[in-house]
Amino acid sequence: MPLYETVFIARQDVSTQQVETLTEQMSAFITDGEGTVAKVENWGLRNLAYKVKKNRKGHYVLMNIDAPAAAVKEMERNLLLNEDILRHMTIRVEELEEDDSVMLQSKSSRGSNRRDSEDSDDAPAAKAADTEETTPEETSEKGEE
Amino acid sequence: MSDARRPFFRRRKTCPFSGEGAPKIDYKDVKLLQRFVSERGKIMPSRITAVSSKKQRELAKAIKRARNIALLPFIVS
């Protein structure tokens, strides 16, 4: 069976408990269609990058699914019908992630594993700033002499 | 370094997504993707970021996916 990743965003005034029942409802569509839900991740209430249906925040839920297309289609149809859901996205993936996704990792360890790559990115910018600073000083020194 | 003195010489940068220990491009990794969009929220051209064309296509797709689920902005105004 094909593998899918679904992310959906629930409205901000929906309670955490309601989000859980929503997730269960959606998983039910998958299991009814003889599929399995490999993993469910709740990213919690996050700020949206832009307003969606006049909402500034939303509850994000990620589901990893192994199910036939018909079951996924049925779940997507219900996601669209549900008014508590602002937006959803299902994509097909080659393999499902077994561990926590980046979203949960960064929450727990504040992205410590990505520090070294950030340093390399900052370095050229810092060098450019240095050269800009040094040139006016040199000229002013010459003027004094 | 003598190379730095030569005019119009630029050190050849390598793609940040190839080689060992390179990060995986994923639409959920907002922190990573944010480094490849401009302040206005546009995707940075690969000639600036030195991402290989194959990875740039992958990256563009990831950024667009992230925009769709409101993880990244379409425009910052």
Image (cartoon, rainbow, N blue to C red):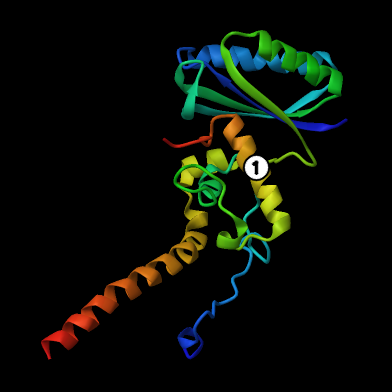
- Is disc 1 surrounded by few (<14), some (14 to 19) or many (20+) residues within 10 Å? some
Name the side, left or right, on which A86 lies relative to A127: right
Q: Nearer the viewer, residue A34 or B8?
A: B8
According to the picture, the residue beneath numbered tag 1 turns out to be B62
Q: Chain of mark 1?
A: B
Q: Please name the residue shown 61% across and 58% down the image.
A: B46
Q: Is residue A99 visible?
A: no
* Residue A69 image position (x, y, % from top left): 85, 23
Q: Please name the residue shown 60% across and 75% down the image.
A: B12
* Residue A110 image position (x, y, % from top left): 45, 47
Furthest residue toward front: A143
Name the side, left or right, on which A73 lies relative to B50: right
Name the side, left or right, on which A86 lies relative to B2: right
Q: Please name the residue shown 59% across and 8% down the image.
A: A83
Residue A31: which quarter of the image?
Answer: top right
How many circles with numbers are drawn on the protein?
1
Q: Please name the residue shown 60% across and 12% down the image.
A: A21
Q: Nearer the viewer, residue B43 or A97?
A: B43
* Residue A60 image position (x, y, % from top left): 55, 26
